Image (spheres, rainbow, N blue to C red):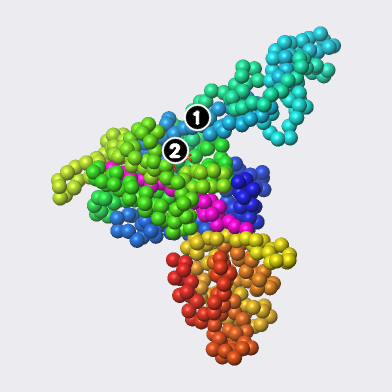
Amino acid sequence: DPVRMEKIVSLCKRKGFIFQSGELYGGLNGCWDLGPLGTELKRNVKEMWWRRHVQERDDVLGMDGSILTHQEVLKASGHVGGFSDPMSDCLLSKARLRADQIEPQSGTAYHFTGAKHEESGWSVERPYSVLLNQPNQDENKARKTAREYYSQFLSDKQISPKKLELLGETTSEEKDVTNYNPENGSLLTEPREFELMFKTYMGASAEDGDPSALAYLRPETAQSIFVQYKNVMDSNRVKLPFGIAQIGKSFRNEINPRNYIFRSREFEQMEIEYFCHPSDGLRLTDEWLENRLAWYEEVGIPREKLHILDIPDGERAHYSQKTYDIEYEFPFGIQELEGVAYRGDYDLGKHKEASGKPLEYFDQETKEKFIPHVVEPSAGCDRTVLALLCEAFDEEDLTKEGGKPDIRTVMHFSPKVAPVKAAVFPLLKKNDEQVRIAKEIQKELQQWMNVDYDDGGAVGRRYRRQDEIGTPFCITVDFETLGEGEGDDAADLKGTVTIRERDSMEQTRIAIDDVLAYLLKRIR
Ligand code: ATP
């Protein structure tokens, strides 16, 4: 649904969730900057992941590895020379494309049999075809491209391309344009491997082209966990099974960054390497899959929008006995959010071999010595953020019969991840007492959560502004709060405020003293 996606992208820019990186200068392709709301949303995602998988568990420890990575680490892991995607060049558009992601497209092919040049008497009988695969392109465009092609021959002969006449009846036909070459029938070159890692050169000897100065920006957070596994284990006296968790930036020079922040060149991962006895690996892989599904549900992605791919034999990495992909129904298709892979002893085995260091685990009770096996739930933080944005976005038609059209744009974020948890309003901006109390409430809440204050315009308008950024609760200080209500219960209502809930739009009155507890219960 491209229209829905466009609306989400536009809201994200308008409200300050996501901006194109380097936009002032035309944008840096595949890189994104998060604005104030996007930053809060992402922080909350990371916080929820950390809380459930690290803070609340005794068997998972955190780490934060460096992004600049020793070349030997990535040689041992197989990334150097092995971490690449197949790339093809499109001869027509000159674009470079990831060969396994080219989607079949149909278009119109125009065929010419050759060209001649009256003045010089030059002519060539070389068939040439032009494919048009964009809307609003017509035969003129095809003729222009063909003219450029034949002009090439002329330019070698120093003849001006003016008055070049295209030969043959122009015929056109609808066809699949993914495999079409103007001269030999295919449009895309044979795929070749394209290295995805970003290289950099470190230290003063970088200037001299010293090969030992070569380092990489990490393509995943996992490798620093493997190479520090022994240090973490020894410094923390942990026993198997245990996990090491990390959230951090990774970098891949993706051939075609696309689908908004879904595939970018700089992104954040949330990974756990869970080390275990070989006999527990398969069971723990299923356990982690369930854990992760429950987590997605908790942050607001319903189970029915998630798809589990049990990767079949032959399609998994050769060392993996089991791999699941968790996919989400994005507006642009069902796509991967996370991989949960049973990696056996592959990674530690490779680092043991390459470094020559003992990476075995010794079990004190059974006296068994072995390389632990690893289960890896590897999630994309930005992809989760995008899934939450897509899931939350809604346009509700609240038009009353016979009334003006009324569409409410609302982001239905779970209160646990919503960037702003609550907004506090004085009913009247000019009422000093209402303003004082509202500011006091805001100050107290701010010690615990991100809170907005808004005194601009009618309360109804303020509610709508908060709906659009997904604030789950709005708190209004009004005349009742001051004990100045008009009803018989005015005295009872003194010291209370209204809380309006975003999704139901219902309001309840509660005592100011209970507001914090009410919110904390719902946002944690
Ligand atoms: P894909 O097939 O989509 O390129 P992958 O299978 O190579 O992804 P992994 O290497 O398993 O991805 O990385 C684990 C997770 O990191 C992915 O599930 C995804 O959420 C995230 N991720 C990987 N590449 C990117 C990217 N270019 N942009 C954003 N997130 C990414």
Q: Amino acid at mark 1?
A: Pro
Image quarter hosting the C terminus: bottom left
Q: Amino acid at mark 2?
A: Ala
Depth check, front residue: 141 or 57 = 141
Left or right, 48 with reference to 145? left
Q: CA distance from mark 2 to mark 1?
A: 23 Å
Report the residue at 50% width, 43% height from top: 335
> Closer to the N terminus: mark 2 or mark 1?
1
Q: Nearer the viewer, mark 2 or mark 1?
A: 1
Report the residue at 70% width, 66% height from top: 401
Q: Quadrant of residue 462?
A: bottom right
Depth check, front residue: 89 or 494 = 494
Left or right, 43 with reference to 409? left
Depth check, front residue: 467 or 204 = 467
The mark found on residue 86 in the picture is 1
Question: How far across and down, in percent of the image, does residue 371 sit?
Answer: 25, 41
Report the residue at 33% width, 46% height from top: 285
Above or below, 179 against 220 in this view is above
Disc 2: which residue:
215
Within 10 Å of disc 2 (Cα), the crowding (few <14, some 14-19, many 20+) is many
Question: How far across and down, in percent of the image, does residue 459 sit?
Answer: 65, 73
112 magenta-colored? no
Q: Which residues are magenta?
A: 373-395
Question: How far across and down, in percent of the image, does residue 309 sit?
Answer: 42, 42
Left or right, 99 with reference to 59? right
Above or below, 267 against 56 in this view is above
Q: Secondary structure at mark 2?
A: strand
The single residue placed furthest to the right in the displayed view is 119
